[in-house]
Structures are given as C-alpha cells and as structure tokens.
Amino acid sequence: MLASVRTCALKGIDGFEVTVEVDISSGMPTLSVVGLPDAEVKESKDRVVAAIRNSGFDFPLKRITVNLSPAELRKSGTQFDLPIAAGILAASGALSEQAVKKLENLLLLGELALDGTLRPCAGVLPMLISTKPKDYTAVIAPDNLLEGRTASVPFITPRTLRDLADWLEGKKADEAVQITYIPPAQEEAPVLLDFSDVKGQTVAKRALEIAAAGGHNVLMIGLPGTGKSMLAKRFPYILPPLSEEEALEITKIYSVCNLVGKTVHLLTQRPFRDPHHTVSDVALIGGGTNPKPGEVSLAHNGVLFLDEFAEFSRATLEVLRQPLENGQVTISRAKETVTYPARFTLLAAMNPCPCGHLGDPHKPCTCTPVQISRYRSKISGPLLDRIDLTVNLNPVAYGDWNKNSEGESSSQIRARVIAARKRQEIRFQGSGTTANAFMTQKQIKEFCPLPQGADAILEAAMRKFGLSARSLDKVLKTARTIADLEGKEQIENVHLIEVLQYRPLDRKGVPDL
Amino acid sequence: MSISTQERLARIRVNAFLYFRADWLTRLIDIFGSAEEILKQNADTLVREAQMNPATAAHFLKDAFSVNPKEELEKTEKYGGRILVPEDAEYPQSLRQLKEAPIALYVLGSLPKENQACIGMVGTRKITPYGRRAANTLAEGLAQAGAVIVSGLARGIDSVCHAAAVRQQKPTVAFIGTGIGRCYPAENRDLARAILKHGGAIVSELPFNKPPHAFHFPRRNRLIAALSEIVVVVEGEEKSGALITAKLALEQGKDVLAVPGPIDSPQSRGPNRLIQDGAGVVTCVKDIIDYIPEPELFKLQTPPDAKTQADEREKKLTDVQKRVWQHIGSGQVTADQLVEELGLSVPQAAAVLFELEVKGLLTSEAGLYGKSKF
C-alpha cells in the first residue's frame, strides 16, 4: 500500500516542503530510504523501526521503500523520523481510514526516541515560517513549542508517536491544536552589562558609541588588562533594540543551529559571539559537508568580537572580507550553494606589539620595530580597510580608577545612538543603505560635503600620519556619524579632527620625516 | 696628488680585509709601496716582508680577491656615489689626519665643506621619551644654526637626530655599519633617502653589499668622532656604542659633551658618568656651539636661547593648548588623561592633540603623547 506525508527540510536558513512517500509491498523485509538523504536521515530507519515497535504497533515485515520528494535536493536533519514512522503506519494499515485522511492535513517534524517519544529537532522555526502551512496543522515535539508559537501556525505537540496515533484516531480531543501569534517585540532589551562599570577609557567608549551609531567596525589596540573585552561585552547593549524582523532573522539562524533555548520565543538580545583565535575558517564563516551557519552568521545583527586579532590565522581572517562587504556569506559546495545572512559589527582587539608592552608607562617594550611591523602586518590591508575606527587603550591611572564619578550609563549612550540611527534611517530611506558605514561612493559625495578649511586638515593628516587617499572615505563616513550623534546637518571640521584621532594602525614605527 | 686607476682598484681590494685595522692596512701599503704591489705578493712574501702570520696572510689574499673592484665602482656609481681614497681632494681632511684613516671610503651624497661645523650626536637605540625630546630639540637647533649633524643611522637617538635635520631640510651625515648598498635597520630606508635628498651624505668604509655585523659598528664610530668637531652623547647605557664613540673622540683630542638625564634612568647612566668624568654639560644648543674650537671658521648663527624659544612657542598656543602642554610636562599623556584630568571632552582633547602633533610639538606612539621638543 502507498501513503504520503508532508514534512520539511532546510536549505540555508529557509525551509522547503518535502513529501515522504512510503510504499509497502511483498518481498524480502527491507527498509530503504531514497531521495538524497544525508547520514542522519539514513540512520532514521533504525530509530523508526524501534519507535514503531515500542509504541505497541507491529512493524510490517515487508519490503518498504521511502522516497523523499523533491528527489533532487539533499535532505539532512532528524525531523524525518516522525513523518517516516507515520507514513509506515499509514501504509501498513495500522491506522484507520479516517486517521489516514487526517494525516494528509498534517506537516510532521520530529525526531523519535527508541521508545517512541518525540524529540525536538533543529530549524523548526525557519521551516514552519517558510512553508507557512495554511491548510494543515504542524506536528512538532513539545520542546519545540515556543518555536511553533513564534511561527504563528496551527500546531499540536504530541508527547509520543502513540499519542499522535490516538489523536488521529480521534481518541484524544481536538483542543490540542495551538496557535499563538508572536508577541510584539520587546520595547527595550534590559542592559545586563553596563558601560558605567568600566572606569576611565573615555576615548574608547566614545569610539564604541560612534561605532554603534554608524555601524562601523572597531579595532581596539591595548595592553593586556586595559578593558578591551570588558568594553566589547558591553557593546551590544548600546546598540539600538532589535526590530521584530531582525529578531526573527536571528532566531531563525539560531534555530537552524539548534541553539534556541526552551524558554524564549524570539531572541531579543543582540547576539555577541567571541570565537577563540584558534577557530577554523569553516567554523567562523560556516560550511561543512552539510552546510551550517558559522560564527559570522550567529553574530548576525549583533557583534562579532575577535580578541587577540593578530593571533588568528591569516587565512581565517581573510574569509571575513565577504561578510564584512556584503553582509552575507555564500557557501558553495559541489552539491549545493547556500547563503546565510551575516551582517555584524566587527570588534577586534589586539596587543600593540608582540611583547604587549608598547606604550606601557611602567614596563619597557622589548620588541624591535621590525617585529612590531611584522606583528601588525598580520592584519592585511584589505581587512584594515574595512575597519573604520582604531582606538588605543592605555592603562588607567589609579587616580582615574578610584574616581567616584560614574561614567555614563549604557542606556544614556543608547539613547544617543538611537537618535543618530533615526537620522540615518530618514537620510537613506529607500536606498537600501542601513547605516553610514555602508554608504556608497555616490552617497558619500551627496551626504558628506567637506566643510571649509577641511582641505588643510586632511592634507596635514596625510602628510603627518601617512593617511592614504583610500582611507579618506572612511574618515568621511565616520565623521558623518559623529555629526549625526551631535544632531548636525553638515559635517564640521571638529568631526573630521575627532575621526583622525581614531586613525588606522601605523605599521612602520619610525620617526616621521 | 692623484693615483692611477689600477691603484684605486687595488685599494678597494685591500680595503675589503676587515680583520685589520685601517692603520695596519696603510702600513702594509707603505711596506710594499702601493696596494697594487701588495696584491702581486703571495702569502709567503707577505709573511716574510710584513711579518704577517701565515693564516692571516692567506685570509687577507682570499678576502682581497673575493671582491670585484670594478663591480664595486660600477654599483656605487649607479647609486650616484663614489669611492674615495685619501689622495682624493674630496676625501675629508679630518679623516685623512686620522691615524686609522680608511683606505677607501664609499660616499653617497655630498660631504660637508671645510667651513661647515660638524657635530657628532650619538646615543642609545633604546630611546626614552626624554631622549627623543632632547635629541630632537638639540639636533633641530644645531641644524638651524648651520651645523651638520653627524651620526650613525641606527635606531633611536641616531634616527631622531638625522630626522630632525632632514625636517629642517639641512644636510646631515650618516656613517653606517653596512655597505652603502644596504640599509640597516631596514625601516630607516625612507630616512636614508631623505638625507640624500637634502644634501646630506651616507658614508661607509665597508664593501658595497656588506651586511651588518656587530664589529662594524664600533669601527665606524671612530669616523663619526673624526669628522665631528665635538661629540654630544644624548643617552646611552653604561656599556654602549655611544660611550665607545665618546672614548674614541677623546682619544682623537675632541671635546665630548653629554646631556644630563634622570639619575634613575639606565639610558642616562652613560652621559651622567661622562659628566662625572669631566665632560661638558649640554642644556641647550648654545652650550654646544660655545664649545666649538675656532668658531670663527664656521659662522654659526647662535640660536635664540632655548627658554626664549620655548616661551615664544608657548605664546602662540591657544589657552586650551597651553593647558595641555603644561599638563604633559616632561611625561606622556593619553587622550583619556586629558579628558579625566583636565575635564576636556573627547572631541576637544582630539582637536588639541591633533593640532599640537601637526605642529610637530608632540609625537605619539601607541596612544601615548609626549613632547617632541622642550
């Protein structure tokens, strides 16, 4: 006999509908799954057999063929256990005709334990959102309940395979069907880590405020223990709150990676990812035989913090160039190509020199200029070009540390950031640009006219600091953000001068001529 | 007096033997009458006639024939330089009078004239902010007064002194510890180019492509001392190249001056010791100029007194710049400190630091700003 059941599979962070066809015919007892299943789908056979038997059904000792259609797309994930089991029950006649009919209106997603319990699987949210099954009810594991609610589709959450069969047979009431719509996005995410905890480092805080306001990437250079990671961890809380759309995007990515907790509907905090410097390029960018999002995508709409920036392998750092440029990652494998969103703010931190003491008032640096230059050259030019703000952190003097005056709180800073973002939103309306950092050449020309006297400043900066013509664009974009923070229509000279304070890493370390 | 081309080529060969002091090489030329004649000898005659040890004689011949003098000349000329021997008129008189006068001198650029006062400025490679300030102020003042700074193009004090002269677009002479076909340290390549551009010279007695070796540096120090009227030691540890130069200068009968420094700074131990031993104390450019023997030869313009100059400079500063300048004192500050301690806003602090740095009054490294002048 033949039965077909609906389920879903993932491609990137989007789902597509899959029909599971089950045919049972006489012959040698086998169970074969066709339709480009991945390893975890093939393993599903053994789980299904055990789950069916342990749920009190007879497993048909016949020739069973399972086809996953469309057959040309690769399928991975453990959500196929439930649909395959249900399909076998339907095809073998273990379910009544009325139950089989009901089954046709279901979309099943779930992994099975050997005793028939439904277990959660990855990617439920994106699969439900992209297929939006209007006419049918989704069946998901109780642990995926919140993701089902977020997707706002009708669904039921049977505990076991047996429960599902009972429901199909009408032995359980229909009230198990739930639909809950997404609650409106939270007004303001709570500040868990506050900038006022960090003593001193006013300049670095200001640089981070500018970065938050204009979407700029930041490189912090400083001695160990000057507060680089402390500042970085507080950075997400001065970013504007997530819009509903952004929150959904993040939640989808985390769902694909099976990282959405059991207690949240929607991730409302901007993500903060800080991979260790030994991270592989695949872990950073995403990929693998069955492509999975990498750290850059997990940091989407949030912050990617790379501590010990110069210790990352050069090849690993270079893969950051595409997401920094396009805000997404395209992973091409022989069999498929997937795209993950990856628009994040890069915060990088490094020591000023290999020994770590350059600029330390108490301990002399023992590095030669050549060593320093070699250390800094680990960060390639094209990558540095994508970093708009470079800030030096020096040890805080005891007097400053001991000061009673609290610095500004994160919510004060965030208020200014939000206001600056509003101005940009109005400015870039309809152009696709979201923040100053992403302005095109044409927009720079339009929105960043040089004030009077700016030529002299920029000329002096080029002569004295060896600023390249190429980095002038970055100066203009960043100056635009400072002007936005101050509510000014036009860029002024003070804004330009302030940006020049955050000029890029000097790679040569010789007296200027 | 001039010498034949053949003899010049032979001198370049003899000069390549670095394990003899220059005066021994000169003695060798005297014994055989000419460098050409030496090269005609075999190891045995060298041992017999010049009392050389057989191993040394073999080594000498090997080294002498390992260089190709024609190629040396060609390469030097390609760089726009020349190889001088003491018989050449351009060969500096002060070096010619030296007992250990180099028998060949590779020169790029132009050497100072007789009526230009040469001041040797030497010091540590591990420069402190104080040393940077002192070296920069003094070298700049000397260059403005019309003196030629002579130093060794090493890291630290040497580079700061050369750079100060170059910024004034004044000539400066670098005696380097490699052949003139190389630049050591490599990061000073731009500085070397700038020296040549502004009428200075890069000089070495080593074969064109000789890489740096520890023993090259003390050896070239005698040339710094010889070309200079006086030698100023800015900073230096107790056993340093700077003190070797000072010792050589004293042996050559030159005056040695020292810039006093903090008693707890290892880099000031050298000059402070020199002062204990009787060296002149330098507090300003005038102190140095006053020490020059026969000053009427050089027509140096005595610069305004350092304090007057500093006052002048300070007068031109705006109020907030003045506050920052005074706050920096003799130390270093970060932009953060200006914000915390002077109550400036971040943009204000940025503006002041930018303006002072563009004026050349401050230097910054890794976020620390220090004065580049007194």
Image (tube, grey):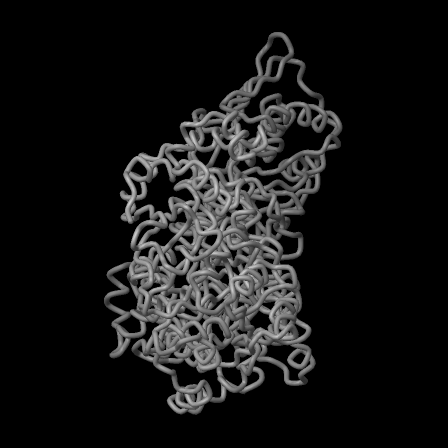
**How far across and how far down the image is residue A86, in percent?**
61, 30
- Can I make out residue A152 in this image? no
| Residue A173 horizontal/vertical position (percent) | 66, 46
Q: Does B229 appear above or below A26?
A: below
Q: Visible in this render: residue A81?
A: yes
Camera-nearest residue between B286 and A212: B286
- In this orientation, which residue lies closer to the viewer: B58 or A239? B58
Q: For this view, does B218 lie left or right of residue A45?
A: left
Classify residue A66 by image quadrant: top right
Q: Which residue is drawn at 34% across and 55% down?
A: B193
B105 with respect to B230 (left or right): left
The tally of labels here is 0
- The spot of residue B274 in percent (x, y) is 62, 71
Task: Tell me: A344 left or right of A467.
Answer: right
Identify the residue at the far top of this view: A27
Q: Which residue sits at x=62%, y=55%?
A: A355
Which is more toward the observer, A181 or A363? A363
Q: Is residue B5 above or below residue A402?
A: above
Image location of residue A218, percent across then percent down: 48, 61
Residue nearest the observer in this picture, A463 or B138? B138
What's the residue at 56%, 34% (across, down)? B51
Classify A139 as above or below A388: above
For image coordinates 54% across by 73% down, the residue present is B257
